Amino acid sequence: MRHVRPALLLLVAVFLCVPLFGLVTGGDWGQAGLSAADVRAILTSLIGGGGAVVLIALVGTPFALYLARASTRLSAFAEAAVLIPMLMPTLALGILLAAFYGPAAPAGALFARIGLVLTNTPAAFVLAAVYAALPTYIIAARAALGEVPVELENVARTLGDAPLKLFFRVTLPLAQRGLAAALALAYVRAMGEFGIVLIIAYFPAGMPVQLWTDVQDFGIGAVFPLLAAFLLAALPVPLWLGLRARRIIA
Amino acid sequence: MTLAVDYRIATPIKLHIHCEIRGFTALLGRSGAGKTTLLKALAGLLPAAGAPWAGLAPERRPVGYMPQGAALFPHLTALENAAYALRGPDRFARARALLDDLGIGALATRSAASLSGGEAQRVALARALGRGPELLLLDEPSAGLDGATRDAVMLALIETIDARGIPALAATHDPAVAGLADWLVLLAGGEIIQQGTPRAVFDHPVSVAAAELLGYQNIWEEGGGWYAIRAEDIGLSDTGLRATILSIREHGAGWRLECAAPRRVTVFLQAAPAALTAGETIHLDLPAAKVKRLLA
């Protein structure tokens, strides 16, 4: 038993890391480079995904704080509202969003009238990323905010701080590691989103869709430079923030 | 130093509070009686109707609130905690002066998370004083202190607050802490059942509930009236109340006797009684001056 446990741990850890070996052994690194379409896809993902993350932080943080503090019938409804898009298969979500925001749908037509076309535009890309990542962020942020003792917020109020001020002086500093990890998680979801963008934001292609079309056109071996760029954009910062939130690194 | 309070609170506990706060006032009540609720309502953290300040947001009330366990901001130093309510470029200098005044200037650079219970409480007091309060609210100030130094720390706290001339209301369930206060208020059944100086209240509990809160061990009904006497006020005599000893155990420097007379009577004896044993019959002396007559 004493030797079995570490061996089992090692086995599972190696199994989980196998995809990284594929990065070294599987690619046709010799002749392939980044095409102009690949570079456009990288920029689309970074700018669109980054914009989505900013929106998510602005909208999701107050919502998560409300969920962390309130327990009313309304907050129970709000919890369900967060879970529904998160649990829905992304492809199904994409189809439903197309049916709502599409040019033929009433809501889509309404947005189009004020100049906001929500299919196959940069705005549609951001919209898809927000739907993919906002619920994830809210749930993780809610857990982080829930760990801040309400008593400390109470004391801050009696010391003269209005709610918004005490959020920046007490709640945010105490929850910052967890909130940063939540944001990183949201960023990863936004970067990696495929099912929703496939339906409502096939153009402009972000990295996942570009990878998909490249695989179709040129085969697996040819896409490794873009794949590497994809992983470089998506993995390191969230990994660092995630480890920091778990206090594995300082 | 005197403040009249008239508060009606609906939730989480229904309370109607009518009392005075004079100097350092102890609010004595059982756990769950609503002490914390009243403190939070006075701080504006729970809704209440009445005077003073009802309807005013917590950040607008001239109140210093010290919850149980000090509740310092753990991401700040002692000095930053003390400076929290202060504004202006000289805020840290003023906070430093506050800490020096309370004899804890040396703690200024320490992280709040690293302080002991007593140290944290002093920093929390400095932080609350920075607010310039007209009333201090302390929730179980003796809770974080260990038994050996508790009374000394509590006395120092009371002297510090009294010296500044700020009325304070301290919630406690401990009659020993209540005995140190300038003024004592008893909370039971959702209202204030008695108030006065600790000596007056301890010597003359008005009701059974008051006597129980004040730690009277013997409360009984006799001929339609209610009476109470402290265990240490009962002595042995040759002729008094006939009682059978149920048990004897050491109690501090003396002895604690549980007797049946035939109602249950608890007695603390200072001197070790020679050769008393369980089952033996004795006579108890209940001095008339020490027997308190209670309202029901």
Image (cartoon, coloured by chain):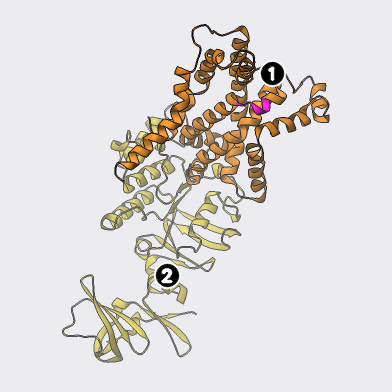
Q: Residue at x 77, y 28 (%)?
A: A101
Query: What is the three-letter code of the residue carrying label 1?
Result: Pro
Coordinates of residue A170 in the picture (x, y in percent): 48, 36
Question: Which disc, if any, is residue A122?
Answer: 1
Q: Nearer the viewer, residue B87 or A122?
A: A122
Q: Nearer the viewer, residue A10 or A120?
A: A10
Residue density around tag 1, few if under 14, some if 14–19, many if 20 or more, within 10 Å = many
Q: Secondary structure at mark 1?
A: helix
Disc 2 element:
helix
Quadrant in which residue A201 is drawn: top right
Chain B on-screen colour = yellow
Q: Is A195 one of the magenta-colored residues?
A: yes
> Which image quadrant for residue B108?
top left
Instruction: Tell me residue B284's x, y (percent).
Output: 28, 87
Image point (32%, 55%), residue name: B155
| Residue A179 located left or right of residue A244 | right
Residue B98 shows in the view: no
User: In whole angstroms, how far apart are the C-alphas of marks 2 and 1?
Assistant: 70 Å
Q: For the residue carrying disc 2, how many other residues have a C-alpha within 10 Å: few (<14), some (14-19), or many (20+)?
A: many
Q: Is residue A153 visible?
A: yes
State which quarter of the image contains the C terminus of chain A.
top left
Q: Nearer the viewer, residue A57 or A249?
A: A249
Residue lying at 35% horizontally and 52% vertically, measured from the top left: B144
Measuring from the top left, give residue A129's x and y in whole percent. 64, 26
Residue stretch in magenta? A193-197
Q: In front: mark 2 or mark 1?
A: 1
Q: Which residue is mark 2?
A: B213
